[in-house]
Image: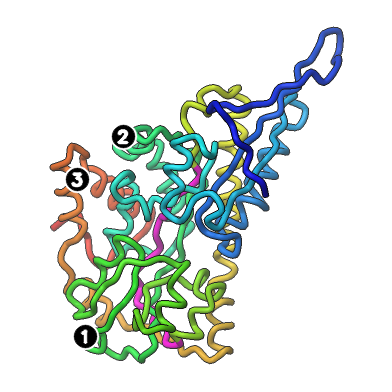
Amino acid sequence: MKHIVRTGLLAAALAVSGLAGNGAALAQTLNVTIVAGHPPVFRWVKHASQTFIPAVNKALEGTGTTIEWSEQYGGSLAKVGEELEAVEEGLAEIGLVSSLFDPAKLAPQNVTYFTPFVVSDSTLVSEWMDRLQMDNADMKAAWEANGLEYLGGAIGIDDYLLMTNFPVNSIADLEGRKIGAPGPAVNWLAGTGAVGVSGNLTTYYNEIKTGVYDGVIVFASAALPGKLHEVAPYITKVGFGAQYAGGFAANKDWFDGLDPVVQQALRDAAEADRIAYHADLDASVTKFLEIMTSQGATVTEVDDAFRQQWAAGMDNVAKLWAEKLDASGVNGTAVLKDYMETMRAAGATPVRNWDME
């Protein structure tokens, strides 16, 4: 898929299509590049092609506006964590922005990664995090400060697992082990004796295979496509919880210049994508664990005592994170409280109430 070079943010090609009714109708074709650092093997990228883009196209039928899409995935335009900059700079109009890998610029969006053991329902987390992007002033401001307009389509991540090349029967088994984890999830290892190393899905397999890591914190729906069970066959269901890892965002200057009909089509498509993605995700998690088991993996689930011991042994990383944001001028304490109260009201029963300590 070839990237379309443009000199302006809007970069729309306009052409007169003919007559409609008694007046001339101007048919507008927008050249839109959409970017994701991860490849389409990962479900959220797959749905950008299979759900988001078709939903936009369908919504625009009969409006006189069509879109010529350039899909740039898997590092072809931006690597994991570079999607925000690609959209901000106008290299792409829309991106699947991984807030998880932009913790400095999208700090409030990472609240779930500083509050493990809250809830394992990714559909619930994604629905409410999408709402908070619109309702929480600090979350909304973070997008706008980077020249982005959040569209929705929250990427919820299913309950994180611990996958290792050694069996885990107790927390003591982690002593001295090198465990890869995404961004702030490294903090989950505090108090376990493990050595946390920041990493991401695109490198986990080789790093475990070559001995850089002894294991990773990862989720089932990515572990199977990434074949991680081949190098880390011991799968421990710790109950770290579901997470929010980002969503669709548009270049704000470009978005603000669009017809409101097109703006709404993008927002509606992002919502449709979130719903379809999570229905797909929910149907796959159990199946993927079964497939990995059939291919030699061993799956175990810890008991409540193990989970309580892990959570209690951690520093209150959520409080430390919130206080750091407070000091920088972002109301992290309010973000933390808003998220935790929202999740409890939605039915979550956290192992540890991070905001109340």
Please name whichever residue, 206 or 286, is drawn nearer the observer in this view of the structure.
206
**Cα distance between the residues tagged 3 and 2:** 14 Å
At which x and y percent is residue 202? 47, 67
Q: Residue at x 66, y 38 (%)?
A: 56
User: Which label was assigned to residue 175?
Assistant: 1
Q: Residue at x 53, y 28 (%)?
A: 9
At which x and y percent is residue 166? 36, 91
227 shown above or below 94: below
Which numbered disc, 3 or 1, marks the residue that appears first in the sequence? 1
67 shown above or below 123: above
Which numbered disc, 1 or 2, marks the residue that appears first in the sequence? 2
Q: Residue at x 63, y 38 (%)?
A: 4
Q: Secondary structure at mark 2?
A: helix
Q: Mark 3 sits on what residue?
A: 325
Q: Quarter-wise, where is residue 26 in the image? A: top right
Q: Secondary structure at mark 1?
A: loop
**Extreme residue toward the top, this view:** 22
Q: Can residue 293 be found in the magenta stretch?
A: no
Magenta stretch: give its range.
233-248
Q: Secondary structure at mark 3?
A: helix
Q: Quarter-wise, where is residue 197 in the image? A: bottom left
Q: Mark 2 sits on what residue?
A: 137
Please name whichever residue, 89 or 59, is drawn nearer the observer in this view of the structure.
89
At which x and y percent is residue 28? 71, 24
